[in-house]
Image: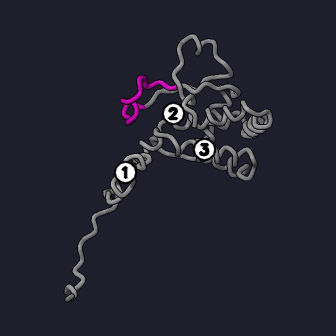
Amino acid sequence: MGGDAVRTMDRRRFIEGGAGVLTGVLAVLHPLAALVPSRAWAVELRTLSQADATTLLAMIHTIAPHDGLDEAAYALVVGAIDSDAATSADNRSQLNAGLASLGGEFGAAAEDVRVARLQQIEFSQFFQSVRLKTLLVLYNNPIAWAHFGYEGEVFSKGGYLLHGFNDLKWLPDVPLVDSGPMPIT
């Protein structure tokens, strides 16, 4: 995942535009909101139109629905798919054909309608490539990590043995059970 996938844009570049820009704002209560200089985010689109990006965003939300996960994490997936489409005419035509097959009303449809529509195309190359990109990009970024409580890699911090190996706060307390007399050794 490249560092330029999510970037802030100055006003001039926004007005000049390209194919489109997907924009949003990090949630105020999001853990990363305090760390970034601006809560606003933008993904510059090289091949997708705004309408296609919105349809793709709805598709990604339907594939990987997570209540409360910031929209910027999903936008990273849209940016990665858009970048892939910009590198190859075949990728671009597959993406355009796949989005056209979903229809313009897909993004505004109810979730059960979107799920049914995606089930109809789940074995297509378009669906599988979007699903794979969603898995690779969505779950491999600090925004999603913060949402799910994953602290990142710990090799540089001494490894899991020294950092969280014995941290069992996520398990319920187990009552101690008397298992009988202690063996004599």
Q: Secondary structure at mark 2?
A: helix
Label disc, if present, on residue 72 of the rendered structure: 2
Q: Which residue is mark 1?
A: 158
State how far apart marks 3 and 1 are (Cα). Answer: 30 Å
Which three-letter amino acid code belongs to the residue tagged 1? Answer: Gly
Q: What's the magenta region?
A: 27-41
Residue at 39 percent across and 53 percent down: it is: 159
Pinpoint residue 160: horizontal percent, then vertical percent.
38, 55
Which one is earlier in the sequence, the residue at label 3 or at label 1?
3
Residue 47 placement: quadrant: top right
Residue at 57 percent across and 37 percent down: it is: 1
Pinpoint residue 132: horizontal percent, then vertical percent.
64, 47
- Residue 29 to residue 128: above or below: above
> Alpha-carbon neighbours of circle 1 within 10 Å: few (<14), some, or many (≥20)?
few
Verify whether residue 33 appears in magenta.
yes
Residue at 72 percent across and 33 percent down: it is: 85
Q: Secondary structure at mark 3?
A: helix
Q: Secondary structure at mark 1?
A: loop
Q: Is residue 117 visible?
A: no
State how far apart marks 1 and 2 are (Cα). Answer: 31 Å
Report whether 47 appears left or right of 159.
right
Q: Which residue is mark 3?
A: 134
